[in-house]
Image (cartoon, rainbow, N blue to C red):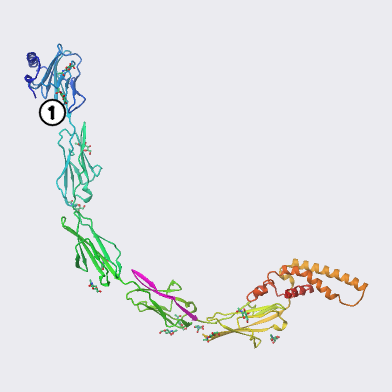
């Protein structure tokens, strides 16, 4: 602080005069002067900024005093900084940066940080006739320099050390200090802030605490933020991970394993094979592996700073690639009830075996079992259901291979005969002059051979399972015997059925009575007409009998179209269906006997002509 005598001012004698006056005044008034609450000194703006100016206003003054005396820090003569005499506008200031305006306010220009202080003004208040002193504080702020973060521990160990970070700033007038961790506010039980926010302490650090940390300082005119600070937290190694994880390798493959465990500083790695040190790198590679590379591979990761280590094993299996097996059986063509033994042939050992039947995985039933490490399949009491294709498959974790199919045929039967049409109580009825198709069905492999007998006589013309008579006559009634035999199983079976030839059932049973009635009407009408004409001719010209043949022709023509509609179910396809469709024929012609009108006979004879 400059002393008042050093103030460069034109009127130094004048200064002395005022000084004297003020001194006297102050000495005289001091005991009675008061620092009234109604007067105050208020900076405008409220704080100063380095390099700019501020005005300290006096508030609470209602009447102009004769003079103003300004002090800094304390109201003592040595701290007086300006005196202003209102009447003549004379200013005496200790510093060229100071000026007092006519209303007494003190302006300070070119502010520096050291202008921060308490300021006083003393004056004579005409209202109260007292000497009063008013006081105010001026704070001057400069722009803040960037703070820095310092740490008590440059390499704290995870789950062990505490660490304190301090925000350091060269600036004195910091009004506010905040921290951010990872761009968010500090939070959590393990984080402790000092009361002034300057120091942040993290208790028992973890690797997640590495930050980055930033601290920010503020004053009313400036903000500044530290560079991000990252804690180097020492941790690990964690349990390592080995990749790839597939434990199976074919012979000749390259084994490349990579071990990694999270660690700071990075871990050191060593590999052991079945307990023998192999390499000291994170990577283990073995080219062209053979079967004896099967075993346990262990990776050990260690951290020299934490002194910790951890390990991980992988069990590698090296296997051969399965080559195609073959399947054999002690027979591929067997009798029912015999025993079949299949063998899966492979050069490999220790393979898994699967059996397939007709391309589906074989499920073992009673009487079937596997032996010799599943390489042998035995099927006891072979049945016809066991005929089909057999395969075996070998597999290991890296490969599988299936044999070609082996076809097995099973010879069986014949065991039972079924006739078609099926007899009603051992008897098959067939209408006179219809056709008869008898089919004898058996189950057999290889297919059965057949012999037919009628009554007791062998019918050599029928050598398969079908017996046909195109136009049944009354003499065809009798006992028909089908004999089936299998020349491999040497089994045979025979069965007889009685065939009875019967008359045509009534037409009503055909399900077409309407058209039958129509036919009857037309036919009767035509017959009547022709008979009348014939009768007239007979009477007019001659009397010999011969009209019957003409009579027949006429009937034939008129009935033909109707007949087609009536029997369309059975007649058009007759020749194609004959071998198997006799059931239909039977159903359509109920066997109830009835008097048959003569014209219906004509209709059926027409069918046979077709
Ligand atoms: C205030 O500072 C400016 C430069 O910043 C200078 O030109 C001026 O003379 C100074 N005024 C006083 C009163 O010191
Ligand atoms: C003080 O202020 C007055 C009026 O505001 C002005 O005329 C005068 O030049 C100033 N003095 C100084 C030393 O700046
Ligand atoms: C630090 O934390 C770990 C786990 O959270 C705990 O096991 C250990 O005891 C703690 N250490 C201290 C000094 O608190
Ligand atoms: C400390 O920081 C908090 C916010 O994080 C703030 O509210 C408080 O005022 C600060 N204290 C100091 C002394 O800066
Ligand atoms: C594995 O067997 C091969 C010969 O097949 C031999 O050369 C090699 O040394 C064996 N390796 C080990 C690890 O025993
Ligand atoms: C590896 O195999 C050994 C014995 O063969 C077994 O004790 C161990 O648990 C296996 N390790 C893994 C990771 O499967
Ligand atoms: C198999 O045995 C069953 C009853 O045991 C018998 O009916 C059948 O004829 C036999 N099959 C052959 C082909 O011998
Ligand atoms: C197949 O071998 C088994 C056992 O040796 C035997 O019992 C069975 O009769 C043989 N089957 C044939 C069809 O040879
Ligand atoms: C196989 O057939 C024999 C005789 O036919 C019989 O005693 C045995 O129970 C049958 N076994 C099975 C599993 O069907
Ligand atoms: C049966 O043999 C006859 C010849 O004798 C033939 O026309 C007919 O098609 C054969 N039927 C079957 C089902 O083989
Ligand atoms: C079968 O025998 C009966 C009577 O014994 C006879 O009426 C019938 O005509 C015979 N059938 C044949 C086709 O010989
Ligand atoms: C069975 O009969 C068929 C056809 O007649 C013939 O080809 C085959 O050789 C016969 N088999 C035996 C074992 O007699």
Front-most of residues 560 and 439: 560
- The image shows residue 369, relative to residue 163, as above or below, that is below
Which residues lie in the magenta part? 390-410
Q: Does the magenta stretch include residue 138?
A: no
User: 416 or 330, which is in the foreground?
Assistant: 330
Q: Quadrant of the C terminus?
A: bottom right
516 lies left or right of 545? left
The quadrant in which the N terminus is found is top left
Specify whether 318 is left or right of 132: right
Image check: 227 left or right of 576? left
In the foreground, 86 or 161: 86
Q: Residue at (16%, 48%) from the top-left corner?
A: 162
Circle 1 Cα neighbour tier, 10 Å, few/some/many (<14 / 14–19 / ≥20): few
For this orientation, the residue located farthest to the top is: 87
Q: Which residue is drawn at 22% across and 69% down?
A: 274
| Location of residue 592 in the rendering, given as x and y in whole percent from the top left corner | 72, 75
Whole-percent x and y of residue 50?
A: 17, 28
Residue 210's place in the image compared with 67, above or below, is below
Q: Exactly how many numbered labels are in the figure?
A: 1
Beta carbon of the mark 1 residue lies under 8 A of ligand 1: no
Q: Mark 1 points at which residue?
A: 114
Q: Where is residue 526 in the image (x, y as percent from the top left)?
A: 83, 68
In this picture, residue 19 sits left or right of residue 410: left
């Amino acid at each position: 602080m400059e002393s008042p005598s050093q103030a460069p001012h034109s009127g130094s004698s004048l200064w002395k005069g005022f000084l004297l006056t003020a001194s006297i005044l102050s000495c005289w008034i001091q005991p009675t002067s008061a620092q009234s609450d109604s007067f105050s000194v208020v900076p405008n703006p409220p704080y100063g900024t380095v390099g700019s100016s501020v005005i300290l206003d006096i508030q609470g003054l209602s009447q102009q005093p004769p003079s103003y005396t300004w002090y800094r820090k304390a109201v003592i003569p040595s701290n007086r900084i300006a005196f202003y005499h209102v009447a003549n506008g004379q200013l005496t200031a200790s510093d060229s940066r100071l000026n007092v305006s006519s209303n007494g306010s003190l302006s300070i220009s070119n502010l520096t940080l050291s202008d921060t202080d308490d300021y006083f003004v003393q004056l004579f208040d005409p209202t109260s006739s007292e000497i009063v002193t008013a006081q105010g504080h001026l704070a001057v702020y400069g722009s803040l320099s960037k703070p820095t973060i310092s740490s008590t521990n440059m390499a704290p160990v995870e789950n062990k050390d505490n660490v304190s970070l301090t925000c350091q700033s060269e600036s004195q007038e910091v009004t506010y200090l905040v921290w951010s961790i990872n761009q968010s506010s500090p939070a959590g039980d393990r984080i402790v802030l000092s009361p002034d926010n300057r120091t942040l302490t993290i208790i028992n650090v973890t690797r997640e605490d590495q930050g980055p940390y930033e601290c920010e300082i503020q004053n009313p005119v400036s903000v500044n933020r530290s560079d991000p600070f990252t804690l180097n937290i020492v941790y690990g190694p964690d349990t390592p991970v080995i990749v790839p994880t597939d434990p199976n390798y074919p012979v000749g493959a390259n084994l490349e394993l990579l071990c990694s465990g999270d660690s700071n500083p990075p871990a050191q790695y060593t590999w052991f094979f079945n307990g023998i040190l192999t390499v000291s790198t994170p990577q283990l590679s073995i080219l062209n592996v053979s079967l004896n590379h099967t075993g346990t591979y262990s990776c050990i990761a260690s951290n020299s700073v934490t002194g910790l280590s951890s390990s991980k094993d992988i069990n590698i299996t090296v296997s051969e690639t399965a080559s195609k097996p073959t399947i054999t059986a002690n027979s591929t063509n067997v009798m029912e009830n015999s025993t079949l033994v299949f063998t899966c042939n492979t050069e490999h050992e220790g393979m898994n075996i699967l059996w397939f039947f007709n391309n589906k995985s074989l499920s073992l039933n009673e009487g079937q079992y596997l032996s010799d490490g599943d390489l042998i399949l035995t099927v006891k009491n072979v049945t016809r259901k066991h005929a089909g294709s057999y395969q075996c498959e070998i597999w290991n974790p890296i490969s599988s291979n299936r044999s070609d199919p082996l076809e097995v045929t099973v010879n069986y039967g014949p065991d039972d005969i079924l006739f078609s049409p099926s007899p009603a109580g051992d008897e098959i009825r067939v209408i006179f002059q219809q056709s008869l198709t008898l089919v004898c069905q058996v189950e057999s492999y290889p297919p059965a051979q057949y012999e037919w007998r009628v009554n007791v006589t062998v019918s050599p013309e029928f050598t398969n399972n079908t017996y046909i008579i195109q136009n049944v006559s009354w003499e065809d009634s009798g006992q028909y015997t089908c004999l089936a035999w299998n020349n491999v199983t040497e089994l045979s079976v025979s069965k007889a059925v009685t065939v009875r030839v019967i008359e045509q059932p009534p037409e009503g049973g055909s399900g077409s009575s309407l058209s039958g009635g129509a036919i009857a009407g037309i036919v009767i009408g035509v017959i009547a007409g022709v008979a009348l004409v014939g009768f007239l001719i007979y009477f007019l010209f001659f009397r010999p009998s011969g009209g019957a043949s003409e009579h027949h022709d006429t009937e034939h023509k008129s009935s033909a179209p109707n007949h087609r509609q009536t029997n369309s179910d059975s007649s058009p396809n007759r020749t194609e269906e004959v071998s198997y469709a006799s059931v239909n024929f039977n159903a359509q012609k109920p066997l109830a006997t009835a008097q048959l009108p003569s014209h219906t006979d004509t209709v059926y004879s027409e069918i046979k002509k077709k």
